[in-house]
Image (cartoon, helix red, strand yellow):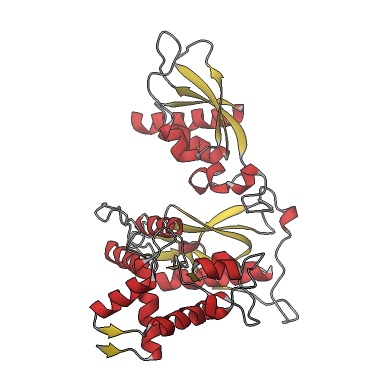
Amino acid sequence: MRKLNQTERVIKFLEFLKKNTDSEHTIKLEHIHKAFADQKLYIGNSKTLHDFIVDLADALNLDENENALPIDEWRIVFDDYVNAYSDEPDKDLGKDYLHIKNLYYNPEFSYDDIDAMVEAIRFSRTMEPDRANKLIDILENNFASKYYKQSPRHICKVYEAPVCESETLKENLSIIQEAIDDNVQIEYRFNGYNRDKKLAPIGDYKRKASPYYLISDNGKYYLIAANERHGSAYIIRVDLMSEVTIPRSKDGKGGIKRIPKKTVKGLPQYWQSDYPYWESDYPLTHYQMSYDAPEYIDLRIHNPKDEDGKSIDPEYTFLHDAFGGNFFFTGTDKKDQNYDIVQVKCSPFGMVNFALQYSSKVEVLRPAHVREKVKERVAELKKKYSK
């Protein structure tokens, strides 16, 4: 049987504890001895192993002043250690008297955290399937015990090839984030795709913008920004930007200060979820990343009912897909019970596109200017397809 040196003992013990324990599946010292003996490895006698575990717990669970970290940040956990370092510690528990009972490794990520990361990786539309599976393997094999219930591996996903070079996109995002952090403006060229499937400049000039928020939606990155010319918020696709720079102020001592948030029309002043509801759900109120200011819009939705006035089948899936929970049932159409009246908050431009996309399900009722815009687009389509 081979005796482990100190470095091997730390590495192999932590690997063993990570893989074979969690808060619901603890382990005893005799089981540790047996597991290592089965591998023909000697980890030490009972006293040596006891002292090693306590020393390792101190190293991982205490700060530089030997004060206990918050318990959810501990890595090595067992009953007496919790009792010794609780809010009311048991002073009689000296280091030599800490019995190792109900020992387990408290992982860096909870199983819920791992589930969330695996889901994010799996449903990324711009990550190749092989790379996604490799990252999922790393997460599950290195940050979860054998008791973690692995997620399904044979889900077919829709993969969208990146629309621009990943390095260019990363550089754009990095420079824009720097400008946001420093509250300064950026310069950039805006591009579109030509018939040769290449990016080409739209206009032979660079544009200026005050950047505020970077957001990800449907596999693409967008920048919410403003400029002096328009004075209101608008949205830029980051993958269509090039030559992004931070221009210097006239004195050369820093960047050009961006437009203050409070003076920009239609710009959310905050992004955190604990701020006003509509502001925290900006993408849901700007359908397909349309950037005009959202309004309350009343819709007439087809929702067939039986003789008792109850819905026959749930018909709101398409609405939920577009607006999440940001729609409100306000009543049944008084002239036809097979239709409901629903209110959403959405940008008018986005709503016109939504209404045309779901023309068999939706009718815009109010406000009048949004309804008129839908009618204009329908008239244009009729004219186009009547030729």
Q: Position of residue 22 (x, y in %)?
A: 41, 63
The answer, for residue 301, to whether it is visible in the render is yes
Residue 162 against residue 51 in the figure, above or below: above
Report the quarter where the C terminus lies: top left
* Label total for image: 0
Residue at x 70%, y 53% (from the top left corner): 264
Residue closer to the observer: 381 or 248: 248
Report the quarter where the N terminus lies: bottom left
Residue at the top extreme? 307
Residue at x 56%, y 79% (from the top left corner): 95
Q: Tell me which corner region of the image, top left, top right, bottom left or bottom right, holds residue 140.
A: bottom left
Q: Is residue 150 left or right of residue 305?
A: left
The answer, for residue 142, to whether it is visible in the render is no
Q: Position of residue 383 (x, y in %)?
A: 40, 30
Residue closer to the observer: 361 or 197: 361
Q: Tell me which corner region of the image, top left, top right, bottom left or bottom right, holds residue 180.
A: bottom right
Residue 384 against residue 337 in the figure, above or below: below
Q: Is residue 155 left or right of residue 358?
A: left
Q: Position of residue 364 (x, y in %)?
A: 52, 27
Q: Position of residue 61 (x, y in %)?
A: 55, 74
Residue 331 against residue 130 in the figure, above or below: above
Residue at x 54%, y 47% (from the top left corner): 283
Q: Tell me which corner region of the image, top left, top right, bottom left or bottom right, holds residue 148.
A: bottom left
Residue at x 43%, y 22% (from the top left corner): 302
Residue closer to the observer: 342 or 52: 52
